């Protein structure tokens, strides 16, 4: 008989002697009192530091680490991340403001996104950040704005490669895409950049995200490097910036295991050694969002009702898809799967039951856990969803049906 797959152990958060989950050194019930309300997100600053240190210890020292703040733009968290990484990648003028307010070095901020408005390009020029150009229109606009403002434009070309990241949750390159410029169209655009006298600095290649297969990530990195090396022949300016993307995944669903960093580190070391010879002025950048913050966060919501419908237990909580769209399965899942969930104020080995955890919204889509075996819970208990540090509050429809918003805290 086959054993059904289970979630990877969520051992990054310890338990107190009474079974209470501890986040940032604080028992969960005490943290809920300190926050003053449920639902809330809590991000453990110790785990954020630990993940950054882990990457620094494994990856080559010459490889720069950037935080992609679209994963979690909470200002306090971005302020911490700015002290742990080499740069910040933003995807809007709003994110740019948060990064600058957090003290990030403008020279190490890059700005991506397929629909940059003229006012945003003006702001990027004024801030002195690197713009990851995604169309010929942006090149012409930057040339015009640079002349108007008397400020140099810093340009990297976001490449839509002719390959995909195999096994990625979201494919960001390969085939027809709204992201970047098709690789075959770049030589002509690079000649135009030289003709306009714009400051070309390098390439941004991001093939996909949420990948747990080290060999697929290594393959994409090698192909990205080779493509950048070929493209570099079409400009008179040296490559200074080579963003090979990220794609590092974390385990969300039953049967998934944590990513093995060792092969990725070995692969990057080989590419860094090649770059020293073939693109000696280039800094290799790895851009990570989810991998930095995803496992360091929990979403906490309180049981407000316990119901039994035709033998099935339902725990109704005070938060749902309006705060955590991803956990509900409505943020990219084709077939809904459960995030790892627990009752955070009860012992995990307490008597359990098959449980449906649902939110307060008047829609059947508001489902946080489907027929999971969870410790028996009552009104007032705290449901915890792990792996919630990325694409949480900012990626959820908080105005839907008019329920209160969610609080975020860095602990």
Image (cartoon, rainbow, N blue to C red):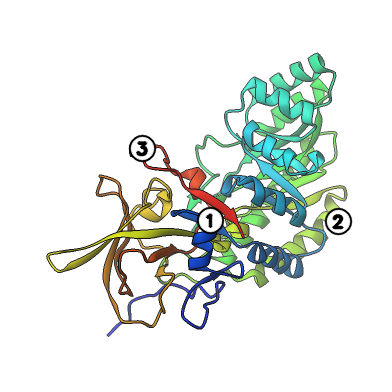
Q: Earlier in the sequence, mark 3 or mark 1?
A: 1
Q: How busy is the neighbourhood of tag 1: few (under 14 within 10 Å), some, or many (20 plus)?
A: some
Image coordinates of residue 403 in percent, x first then y, are 37, 42
Does 337 appear above or below 283?
below
Residue 114, position as x, y percentages in the image: 58, 32
SS at circle 1: helix
Q: Which numbered disc, 2 or 3, marks the residue closer to the eye?
A: 3
The circle drawn on residue 402 is 3
C-alpha separation, residue under disc 3 versus residue under disc 1:
21 Å
Percent coordinates x, y for residue 346 in the rendering: 40, 75
Classify the position of the C terminus by image quarter. Answer: bottom right
- Residue 276 is tagged as 2
Foreground of the two, 183 or 123: 123
Circle 1 sits on which residue? 35
Q: CA distance from mark 1 to mark 2?
A: 49 Å
- Answer whether labels 3 and 1 touch (C-beta < 8 Å): no
Residue at the limit of the structure toward the bottom, as seen here: 1
Counting from the top left corner in percent of width and height, residue 130 is at 75, 36
* Rendered position, 9 above or below 126: below
Residue 378 position (above or below residue 91): below
């Amino acid at each position: 008989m086959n054993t059904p797959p289970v979630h990877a152990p969520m051992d990054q958060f310890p338990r107190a002697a009474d079974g209470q989950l501890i986040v940032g050194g604080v028992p969960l019930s005490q943290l809920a009192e300190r926050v003053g309300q449920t639902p809330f997100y809590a991000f453990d600053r110790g785990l954020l530091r630990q993940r950054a240190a882990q990457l620094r210890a494994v990856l080559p020292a010459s490889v720069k680490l950037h935080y992609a703040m679209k994963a979690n733009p909470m200002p306090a968290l971005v302020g911490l991340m700015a002290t742990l990484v080499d740069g910040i990648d933003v995807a809007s003028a709003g994110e740019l403001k948060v990064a600058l307010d957090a003290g990030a070095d403008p020279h190490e901020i890059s700005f991506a996104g397929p629909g940059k408005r003229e006012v945003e390009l003006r702001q990027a020029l004024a801030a002195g950040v690197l713009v990851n150009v995604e169309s010929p229109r942006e090149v012409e606009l930057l040339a015009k704005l640079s002349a108007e403002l008397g400020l140099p434009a810093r340009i990297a070309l976001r490449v839509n490669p002719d390959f995909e990241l195999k096994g990625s949750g979201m494919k960001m390159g390969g085939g027809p895409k709204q992201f970047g410029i098709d690789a075959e169209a770049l030589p002509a655009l690079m000649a135009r950049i030289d003709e306009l006298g714009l400051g070309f600095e390098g390439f941004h290649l991001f093939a996909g995200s949420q990948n747990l297969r080290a060999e697929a990530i290594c393959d994409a990195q090698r192909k990205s490097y080779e493509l950048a090396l070929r493209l570099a022949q079409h400009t008179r300016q040296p490559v200074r910036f080579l963003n090979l993307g990220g794609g590092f995944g974390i385990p969300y669903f039953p049967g998934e295991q944590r990513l093995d960093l060792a092969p990725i580190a070995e692969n990057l070391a080989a590419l860094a050694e090649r770059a020293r010879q073939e693109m000696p002025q280039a800094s290799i950048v790895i851009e990570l969002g989810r991998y930095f913050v995803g496992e360091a966060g929990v979403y906490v919501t309180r049981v407000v009702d316990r119901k039994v419908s035709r033998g099935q237990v339902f725990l109704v909580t005070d938060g749902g898809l309006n705060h955590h769209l991803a956990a509900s399965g409505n943020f990219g899942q084709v077939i809904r799967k459960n995030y790892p969930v627990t009752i955070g104020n009860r012992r995990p080995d307490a008597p359990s039951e098959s449980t449906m955890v649902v939110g307060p919204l008047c829609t059947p889509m508001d489902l946080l856990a489907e027929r999971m075996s969870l410790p028996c819970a009552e009104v007032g208990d705290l449901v915890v969803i792990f792996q919630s540090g990325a694409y949480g509050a900012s990626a959820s429809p908080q105005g839907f049906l008019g329920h209160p918003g969610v609080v975020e805290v860095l602990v």
